[in-house]
Image (cartoon, helix red, strand yellow):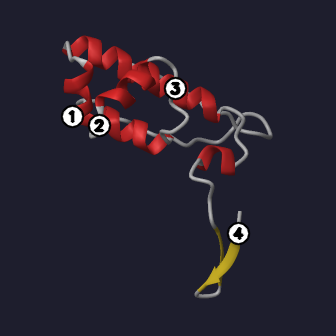
Amino acid sequence: MAKRFVEGIEVETGSGNVFADLRLPDAEKLKFGLVIEVNLTMRTLGLTQEEAGRRMGIPQPKVSALLHGDFANLSERKLMDCLNRLEDDIEIKVKPAAEPVGHLTLAIL
């Protein structure tokens, strides 16, 4: 990742995956959980892939790929945006870690 200074502050360009950039080992687990929630929400709403794609702002073939486990081309942020567009709220909570290294947890309610 490239580093530069903006107004005297060192800034590092991220990879697009904020969790991996922070060296959190559970980055893919988060994406997987978000994909599961997209699938569950689509089923709950009774949406076809075409209808879900229109709501989420992605073409139907990408929805199909997503549901078949090919989500490498979608960022965590995009998956969260998809859930918002499917009428789901997302809450991110940061709290002190019980161990020297914190953990990433996804709770689906």
**Mark 2 or mark 3, whichever is nearer to me:** 3
**Mark 2 or mark 1, whichever is nearer to me:** 1
Percent x, y for residue 86? 25, 30
The kind of residue tagged 3 is: Asp
Query: What is the spatial separation of the Cα atoms under label 2 and label 1, in whole angstroms?
Result: 10 Å
Mark 3 nearby-residue class (10 Å; few <14, some 14–19, many ≥20): few
Tell me, for residue 70, which label it has, or none: 3
The kind of residue tagged 2 is: Asn
Percent x, y for residue 64? 38, 21
Q: 86 above or below 40?
A: below
Which residue occupies 64% across, 87% down?
8
Which residue occupies 56% across, 52% down?
16
Horizontal placement of 6 versus 86: left or right?
A: right
Percent x, y for residue 45? 20, 16
Pointer 4: what residue?
2
How many discs mark residues in the rendered view? 4
Q: Quadrant of residue 53?
A: top left
Mark 4 nearby-residue class (10 Å; few <14, some 14–19, many ≥20): few
Q: Earlier in the sequence, mark 4 or mark 1?
A: 4
Residue furthest out toward the front: 61
Pointer 2: what residue?
84
- The answer to whether residue 84 of the structure is visible from this angle is yes
Tell me, for residue 55, which label it has, or none: 1
